[in-house]
């Protein structure tokens, strides 16, 4: 059985806050369909529009996690954010 990277689980949970957006739904579908084993593999599979959208979501989610002092969430989401650049 293939297991998804813990970092990507945090990402999927964060994306669930934006499911009314078509781009978000596209990203979640991609996560679920491809069973990525690392955040790098996921990021490498994104197009420019998906990366731009994810950048915006991650900035919002990182700000929130910092405000509520959820250090583990900040660390996990930051791992994805760093792969964008």
Image (spheres, grey):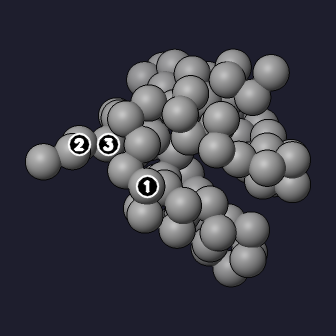
Horizontal relation, residue 16 to residue 38: left or right: right
Question: Residue 58: x percent and y percent?
Answer: 70, 40
Which sits earlier in the primary sequence, circle 1 or circle 3? 3
Dot 3, crowdedness within 10 Å: few (<14), some or many (≥20)?
A: some
Residue that appears at 49% across and 26% down = 76
Question: Residue 68: x percent and y percent?
Answer: 56, 34
Q: Secondary structure at mark 1?
A: helix
| Residue corresponding to mark 3 | 4
For marks 1 and 2, give the CA distance. 11 Å
- Residue closer to the observer: 28 or 46: 46
Q: Secondary structure at mark 2?
A: loop
Q: Quadrant of the C terminus?
A: top right
Dot 2, crowdedness within 10 Å: few (<14), some or many (≥20)?
A: few
Q: Which image quadrant for residue 30?
A: bottom right
Residue that appears at 37% across and 50% down = 35
Figure check: 79 above or below 53 = above
Horizontal relation, residue 66 to residue 49: left or right: left
Q: Which image quadrant for residue 28?
A: bottom right
| Residue corresponding to mark 2 | 3
Residue 79 numbered tag: none
For marks 2 and 3, give the CA distance. 4 Å
Figure check: 72 above or below 57 = above
Question: Residue 62: x percent and y percent?
Answer: 67, 33
Horizontal relation, residue 72 to residue 67: left or right: left
């Amino acid at each position: 059985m293939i297991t998804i990277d813990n970092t990507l689980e945090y990402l999927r949970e964060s994306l669930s806050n934006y499911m009314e957006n078509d781009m978000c739904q596209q990203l979640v579908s991609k996560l679920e369909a491809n069973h990525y084993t690392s955040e790098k593999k996921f990021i490498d599979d994104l197009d420019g529009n998906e990366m731009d959208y994810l950048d915006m979501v991650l900035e919002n989610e990182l700000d929130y996690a910092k405000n509520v002092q959820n250090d583990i969430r900040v660390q996990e989401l930051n791992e994805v954010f760093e792969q964008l650049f």
